[in-house]
Amino acid sequence: MKKYDFIIAGGGMAGLSLAYYLTQSPLRDRSILLIDRDQKNRNDRTWCYWERGEGAFESILYRIWNQVEFHGPTLSGLLDMGSYRYKMLRGIDFYTFMDSHLARFSNIERRQATINRIKDTPQGGFVIADDEPFIADYVFDSTYALNLTIPENHNLLQHFKGWVIKIDQPFFDVSRPRMMDFRVPQQGDCRFVYVLPFDEQTALIEYTLFNDKLLTDAEYDNDLHQYIQNHLNGLQFDIRETEFGVIPMSDVTTQENPSKHIIRIGTSGGYTKPSTGYTFQRTQRYLRSLVDSLAQTGRPQRPVSWWQKRYKFFDSIMLNVLEKHRYPADAMFSVLYERNPAERVFQFLDEEDKFFDDLRVMNSMPKWPFTVALFDVLRRKFVS
């Protein structure tokens, strides 16, 4: 049985990003095995995120915008993003970049296989993939499935279906993406549409929901058709690409370090922000911190201050408002951007602002529903 320094279990965004950051560190010459069951050879997803300055993948970004549109019941128009930029990265471009980059390192081995088992042993992290055993000093696992059935937690889903459409005439303003457009029937949920233009005739139209129940394919398609009919002048179009995804929005307790030799990363390690489902940028930030710790101390333990953990409590309150329908979601997001500069909102959601700014954001929200949610969260966590 071959032993490695590191095994990366799961070669999606988190696993590939970890391999990349390891190659950018003093650990670049360590033996690494990366296992994933799928070939990453198609554009299966799109990541959009806001960021200040330049990030690690600037050279492969598909689009960068310095302004975004928001459409809600009481606010409609452009948001001032301040020092932030809204960035779009296509999955296929990310995978192609990683294939090329990781191929330069002979110490990195990649296997296409189904992971059957991961466990800790006194000798190291143990992985069985396609019935073949492997062992490493550390196993970084992005395949662990969170338990989303614990009643004390809030367990919503962010699910979405998107079409890349092509029309036969110039229509889209390439400089004005729609980040959140709530002009769709809410049906008691949080429902909105992204419109991300590639050029004047091509755009990604993505329908997104926050609730606890997936739709049928026909329902997603019907709502996409209705949006195009009502808000894109009913243009005739061809569908060039389709993408679909489900992201857990849960405040379930996660363990990044469940045992001595196993480290959970990505959604498995709690990298997804529960109240929004945003994952890409947080994953990059957390993985850089994890690799820095491993390089400096020999232990892959990302430092998290007790003070930083306050955001998990804030997330639970937000999830409670959404789950219990305490305030209409479209109105809530409108209030958020009406009463705060977008830059402050982005800082708050990125968990990078100061406590005084936290208070300003929280004080801007409707008082009664959030107060009720606060006490319900306390009851769930400390009484149940």
Image: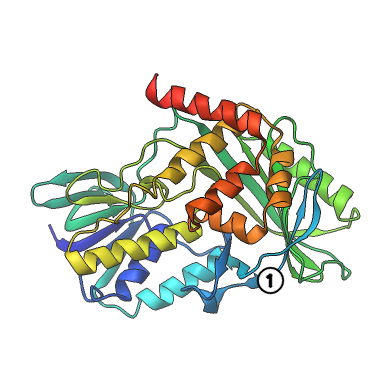
Q: Is residue 278 visible?
A: no
Q: Is residue 41 above or below residue 123?
A: below
Q: Residue at left 38%, top 54%?
A: 37
x then y, percent, for residue 17: 40, 65
Q: Residue furthest right?
A: 233
Q: Residue at left 72%, top 44%?
A: 335
Dot 1 amino acid type: Asn
Q: Nearer the viewer, residue 180 or 355?
A: 355
x then y, percent, for residue 130: 28, 49
Relative to 185, 94 lies left or right:
left
Relative to 265, 152 lies left or right:
right
Relative to 270, 218 lies left or right:
right
Q: Residue at left 68%, top 40%?
A: 217
Q: Is residue 253 above or below residue 21?
A: above
Q: Which residue is mark 1?
A: 66
Q: Residue at left 43%, top 71%?
A: 98
Q: Nearer the viewer, residue 197 or 108?
A: 197
Q: Residues within 10 Å of mark 1 (few under 14, many from 20)?
A: some
x then y, percent, for residue 332: 69, 40
